[in-house]
C-alpha cells in the first residue's frame, strides 16, 4: 500500500464507528434493495472494454451481487472477491460457493495479481487517500487491464445532509462529532481524471443520477441503514438510535414528499471510472 491510514481514521474505525471491532456491516440489511443497488454495477461492468479476461477480482464485494455481475460478463475467467466484513463474505460464499472469497481490508490487501479486471463498486467512499488507493490498484493490473470504479456522489443530497444535521443538533452531538469523517474523501470527475491520466492508457469517466421509486420516507431510511447511516448509528445506544432515526425520517419526509400512492423518488448520483492500464 502506497500510504498508511491517517491516525484519525484509525481512531474513527476503532472507537467512534466501531466497525473494525464489531463488524456492523449487515448483508441482510444491504440486500433489502438489491435490485436498485445492483443496477449501477451492472451498467459499469457492461462498459468495460476488455474481452480477453482471465483473472478478475471484486474488491469490497459485499454480499456478492457485484461479483455475480463480473462473473456473468466473464464466465470463463477466474473471478474472486474480497471484503473487510466477515458477514458480507459469508453471504458472498453462500451465493457463489464455487468462487474464492477472502476477508481483507482494501488498505492492507497484499494480493499483487496481476488482474485483467479489478472491480470496486461503492467502496472508495469509505477509504481515505483515493490517490494512493487507486494507484495501488492500477499497479495490480496486467498490461491492458482495467480498473472499474463506482463511487456514490450523493453527499449533497438531502438524504446525506440530513444525517449530518441530525447528528449536529441532538444530545448525541459529542458522540457523533467524527461520524462523517470516514466518508468525506471524495472528489469530482476532474480530480480523478487529473490524478489518473498519467498512469493509464485509457480513461472513461461519467456520472449518472438514478431515481429509485421507494415506498415512502421509511424505505429511504431503511436503504441508508445498511450504508450511510452506519457511522451515525453505531456509536449510539438503542434509545438514542430510535430518536435519531425518528428525527431523520421526519426530515426525509419533508425533503421527499410522497406521491398520492405513497411513493417517493430517491435521487442517487453516482460517479463511474474505467481506467485501462
Image (cartoon, helix red, strand yellow):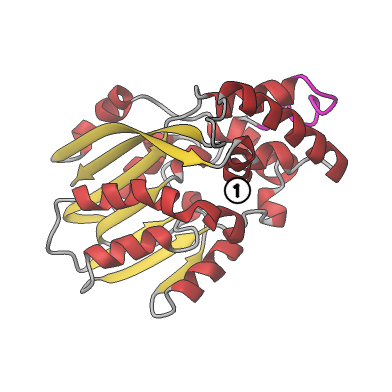
Residue 227 vertical position relative to residue 110 in the rendered view, above or below: above
Residue closer to the observer: 258 or 60:
258
User: Which residue is rendered at x = 52% and y = 30% of the image?
Assistant: 259
- In this rendering, position of residue 175 left or right of residue 163: right
Residue that badge 1 annotates? 226
User: Which residue is rendered at x = 57% and y = 44% of the image?
Assistant: 223
Residue closer to the observer: 146 or 139:
146
Residue 184: tell me if it is visible. Answer: yes
Residue 145 occupies quadrant: bottom left
Residue 261 location (% of width, % of height): 54, 37
- In this rendering, position of residue 57 left or right of residue 245: left
Instruction: Return the residue found at the far front.
Output: 260
Residue 253 location (% of width, % of height): 63, 27
Number of other residues with Cα within 10 Å of mark 1, as a class: few under 14, some 14 to 19, many 20 or more: some
Q: Which residues are magenta?
A: 169-179
Residue 271 occupies quadrant: top left
Residue 113: tell me if it is visible. Answer: no
User: Which residue is rendered at x = 62% and y = 57% of the image?
Assistant: 26
Residue 177 vertical position relative to residue 202 in the rendered view, above or below: above
Secondary structure, magenta segment, majority class: loop
Indicate the secondary structure of the residue bearing disc 1: loop
Residue 40 location (% of width, % of height): 35, 46
Q: Is residue 103 magenta?
A: no
Residue 102 vertical position relative to residue 125 in the rendered view, above or below: below
User: Which residue is rendered at x = 58% and y = 35% of the image?
Assistant: 182
Residue closer to the observer: 249 or 69:
249
Residue 160 occupies quadrant: top right
- In this rendering, position of residue 39 left or right of residue 84: left
Q: Is residue 176 magenta?
A: yes
Amino acid at each position: 500500500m502506497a500510504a498508511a491510514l491517517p491516525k484519525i481514521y484509525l481512531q474513527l474505525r476503532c472507537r467512534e464507528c466501531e466497525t473494525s471491532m464489531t463488524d456492523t456491516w449487515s448483508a441482510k440489511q444491504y440486500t433489502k434493495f438489491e435490485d436498485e443497488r445492483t443496477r449501477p454495477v451492472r451498467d459499469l461492468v457492461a462498459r468495460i472494454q476488455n474481452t480477453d479476461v482471465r483473472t478478475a477480482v471484486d474488491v469490497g464485494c459485499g454480499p456478492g451481487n457485484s461479483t455475480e455481475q463480473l462473473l456473468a460478463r466473464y464466465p470463463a475467467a477466474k473471478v474472486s472477491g474480497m471484503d473487510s466484513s466477515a458477514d458480507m463474505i459469508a453471504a458472498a460464499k453462500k451465493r457463489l460457493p464455487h468462487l474464492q472469497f477472502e476477508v481483507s481490508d482494501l488498505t492492507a490487501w497484499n494480493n499483487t495479481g496481476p488482474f485483467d479486471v479489478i472491480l470496486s463498486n461503492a467502496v472508495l467512499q469509505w477509504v481515505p487517500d483515493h490517490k494512493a488507493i487507486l494507484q495501488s490498484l492500477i499497479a495490480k493490473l496486467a498490461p491492458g487491464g482495467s480498473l472499474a470504479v463506482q463511487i456514490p456522489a450523493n453527499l449533497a443530497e438531502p438524504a446525506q445532509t440530513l444525517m449530518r444535521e441530525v447528528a449536529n443538533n441532538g444530545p448525541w452531538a459529542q458522540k457523533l462529532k467524527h461520524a462523517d469523517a470516514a466518508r468525506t474523501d471524495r472528489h469530482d470527475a476532474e480530480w480523478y481524471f487529473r490524478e489518473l491520466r498519467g498512469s493509464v492508457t485509457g480513461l472513461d469517466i461519467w456520472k449518472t443520477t438514478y431515481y429509485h421509486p421507494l415506498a415512502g420516507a421509511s424505505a429511504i431510511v431503511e436503504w441508508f441503514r445498511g450504508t450511510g447511516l452506519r457511522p451515525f448509528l453505531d456509536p449510539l445506544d438503542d434509545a438514542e438510535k430510535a430518536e435519531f432515526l425518528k428525527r431523520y425520517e421526519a426530515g426525509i419526509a419533508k425533503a421527499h414528499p410522497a406521491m398520492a400512492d405513497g411513493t417517493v423518488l430517491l435521487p442517487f448520483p453516482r460517479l463511474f471510472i474505467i481506467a485501462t492500464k
